[in-house]
Amino acid sequence: MKEFIEETQNHAFRFVISTFRLQGLVLEVNLLRELRHPYIVKFLHHVVDKRSTTLYILMEHCPGGDLKRLISKCRQTSTFLEEGFIWRILKQVCEALKVCHTRQLQKGRVILHRDIKPANVFLDANGDVKLGDFGLARTLNSEASFATTFVGTPYYMSP
């Protein structure tokens, strides 16, 4: 599998060459197309090259990087994130998840992200959250109380 992310000043391009990963990204494109919220990464456009089985996704650029990089930088420099910043990030992630869990998509379905981790929490130029990477997301009927499969990043999954 090959996956690349190219960044410009205003946009991020993500392109993938893999049939397996392509299916997850098609789901991600369909979900992001419907989800509009200040704390969820904006989907702008996509193109599928069927000849090379490559999916190109144009998304909003997040110049602040992701929380994983920020946490790593703090560890390397022996610095700490301000408590107020941590609370603001947590609040914004919760607001993004609330939209996913309560948003009624077509046919009354709701979204479970299923891979919340620092690498999937991006920061814009103002330091505000942009929840991204919905490749493992799942939609559920609003009557369903839980998902029946387990996916995600092991260290970040609930016990």
Image: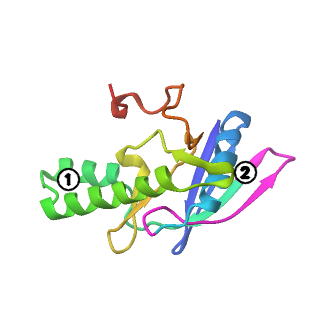
Left or right, residue 126 beside residue 113: left
Residue appearing at x 63%, y 50% in the figure: 108
Please state, as top left, top right, bottom left or bottom right, where the N terminus lies in the image. Answer: top right
Residue 22's tag is none
Residue appearing at x 32%, y 25% in the figure: 159
Q: Amino acid at mark 1?
A: Cys
x and y percentages locating residue 141 in the rendered image: 60, 41
Residue stretch rendered in magenta on the structure:
38-55
x and y percentages locating residue 79 in the rendered image: 13, 55
Left or right, residue 126 beside residue 75: right
* 53 or 100, nearer to the observer: 100
Q: Is residue 40 magenta?
A: yes
Left or right, residue 67 beside residue 21: left
Residue appearing at x 49%, y 67% in the figure: 37
Residue 74's tag is 1
Label 1 or label 2, whichever lies nearer to me, is 2
Q: Which residue is mark 2?
A: 55
Say what secondary structure mark 1 lies in. Answer: helix
